[in-house]
Image (spheres, helix red, strand yellow):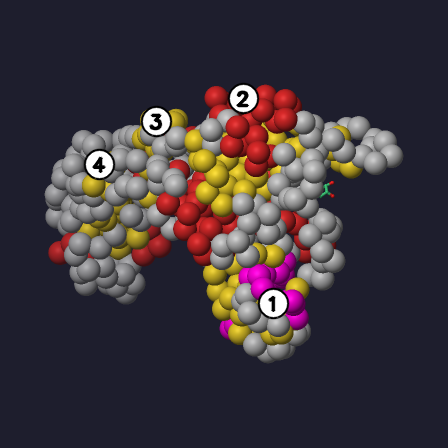
Amino acid sequence: MIPMNEAVRIVTDSVTALETTTVPLMDALGHTLADPVVSDINMPPFEKATMDGYAVVGADVAFATKSDPVALEVVEEIRAGSVPTKTVQSGSASRIMTGAPMPEGADTVVMVEDTETENGQVRILEPTATGQNWVPLGEDVRTGDTVLTAPRRIRSPEIGIMAAVGVTEVPVYRRPVVGVVATGDEIVEPDDVPAPGQIRNSNGYSMAAQVLRAEGQSSYMGIAGDTVEDLQRVMQEGLDTCDVLLLSGGVSAGVYDLVQGVMRDLGIEVLFDRIKMKPGKPLTFGVCGQKLVFGLPGNPVSSLVGLEMLVRPALKKMQAVVDCHRPRVTATLEASFSQTPGREQFVPAFTEFVDGSWTTRWVGHHGSADLFSIADANSLFVVGTDQAEVAAGAQVDVVLLTEW
Ligand code: AMP
Ligand code: MG
């Protein structure tokens, strides 16, 4: 039996980033950018008005007031998307819209709010300092500038930046294809009504969902019975078609817990099979070349926790995510919590930020088969291996499962 941090290290050390590929910009959200992005244009690409108003010679309007307005002749109207054709000189102005190019000769934009118009003339009613209300060409970015470094997670701003510099096919790390298999003679699909002795396959579906949350591509492979033949067939198919294979069930010490034996039969090198963690002590991990195989415990809470703590970092690292772990915070424990020492416990909890600090409370699940209380959990607080009791008010380490 190995400690949890050792298990995490073994898993993440077994992972290398997958190859890169390209995806259309609209599909790039959440991927890891694989190459730096360089701008093909200046931004803004021209001298651009930032207000609706009048483009003028600054010296004309520096001292305008309501009682002593400055009258200027309006020579043209410049809309966003059009190109100015007239030069502005002392005594004249061009009506200009936000985002439109500045006309030759003008060095200032007077906001429309500071003006009134009459018979083709504009009267400037307030002073405006020279240089106001427009931005120079290339102020934000110059042609050839690196606008995004890599690797980095593609979020909404990165999407906008790539659109702005004309990148429509985005270089990204390929997403891992993750085969999901439920094992057990008693397991039936959700659209069946379980006969006596049967239970519905919840893990297959929650696992596939967790894979999606880790930006993996889940491939649901159905239910395998507790036979060597069935497990061999499905595992071989998983190794042939997937980067990662997740199995639920069949990893404890029962007579029909055959997963580990079949893994070895297929040449999968088992790197550990027991972790000093709760829930989910029996968790088997093996590698076959670059492929990873996880035998997760059948109990739903154990499966959920094991996947978040061990599989998710692997899926993230395959996509070159540097910070591949769930974020942690320190929180105040609302009520005392006790355990039998010997394993590090990850307790399903509700954690919130109130009045300037984090607080956390156990959601009150009764064991690793209790899927239903877990719907209240948004986090896991950690109880150390040797701790028998954590007092109310103590500071505990919390793994945040935001969006799981
Ligand atoms: P096992 O690890 O195969 O001994 O399974 C442990 C417990 O988890 C048993 O009560 C199983 O019925 C249950 N279980 C196993 N697989 C699933 C599954 N796919 N969905 C829900 N419960 C499961
Ligand atoms: Mg089983």
Pick whichever of labels 2 and 4 is earlier in the sequence: 4
Which residue in the protein does label 4 denote? 38
**Which residue is rendered at x = 63% and y = 58% of the image?**
348
Q: Is residue 159 left or right of residue 197?
A: left
**Kind of residue indicated by mark 4:** Val
Coordinates of residue 351 in the picture (x, y in percent): 59, 63
> Does residue 312 appear in this view?
no
**Quarter location, residue 228:** top right
Which residue in the protein does label 1 denote? 341
Q: Which residues are magenta?
A: 338-361
Pick whichever of labels 1 and 2 is earlier in the sequence: 2
Which residue in the protein does label 3 denote? 21
- In this view, the residue in front, 252 or 63, is 252
The residue at label 3 has a CB less than 8 Å from ligand 1: no
**Which residue is rendered at x = 19% and y = 63% of the image?**
63
> How far separated are the C-alphas under marks 3 and 4?
18 Å
> How far separated are the C-alphas under marks 2 and 3?
24 Å
Q: Main secondary structure of the magenta part?
A: strand
Q: Is residue 157 left or right of residue 71?
A: right
